[in-house]
Amino acid sequence: MKYTFLGRTGVKVSRLCLGCMSYGSPSWRPWVHDDAASRPFFRRAVECGINFFDTADMYSLGASEEVTGRALKEYARLEECVVATKVFNPMSDGPNMGGLSRKHIVQGCEASLRRPRFGPPAGGQRPLHHQGDSKIQDAQLGEDFTDVVEVFAQRLRDVRYPGQP
């Protein structure tokens, strides 16, 4: 496996990243693999040297993060892994359950950190997950997001590298 630096963080990640949208709960989408069915994919990825895994809070409404966490605990050396999870898309039809408001970003980080842990010392990155069609100004969003993540990083020490697409 070839590795490269993740932006300017100094963290090395595999040039291939395992996208984890297909792992979680088939009740969310019929093509999603449950915990047991996903294990061979994670095992093979780790065997091939992949240490970079991408998920999002909205994939299977959080179950993807749980499946990813359990599989990595079983197959990987967590201190070598980087897990990127994202926030933006609605988690339900209720108000404030999606978007890039400070409230939703905080709720999304808290919910991700309550799920079965990727556990220290695994790396965690939480980029924004939106296609740019929001009315939010990117400059202000960047400041708000960085402020929120810095608070969480100091308090929880699990969110290592905030990122934006």
Image (tube, helix red, strand yellow):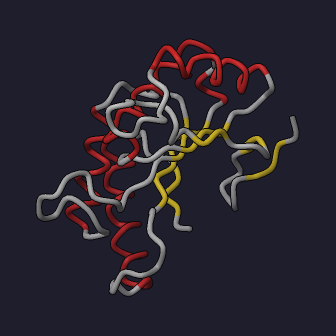
Residue 132 vertical position relative to residue 162 in the rendered view, above or below: below
Image position of 121 (left or right of 14): left
Q: Residue furthest left?
A: 95
> Which image quadrant for residue 13?
top right
Q: Where's the C terminus, which quadrant?
A: bottom right
x 37%, y 30%: residue: 25
What percent of the width, then of the height, locates residue 3? Answer: 82, 43
What percent of the width, then of the height, locates residue 67? Answer: 45, 25
Image position of 48 (left or right of 150): right
Image position of 111 (left or right of 165): left
Q: Residue furthest front?
A: 30
| Most foreground residue, 19 or 139 | 19
Residue 147 vertical position relative to residue 44 in the rendered view, above or below: below
Q: Where's the N terminus, which quadrant?
A: top right
x 37%, y 67%: residue: 145
What percent of the width, then of the height, locates residue 87? Answer: 38, 56
| Most foreground residue, 139 or 72 | 72
> Which image quadrant for residue 89?
bottom left
- The count of marks equals 0
Residue 92 vertical position relative to residue 37 in the rendered view, above or below: below
What percent of the width, then of the height, locates residue 29? Answer: 39, 40
x 73%, y 21%: residue: 44
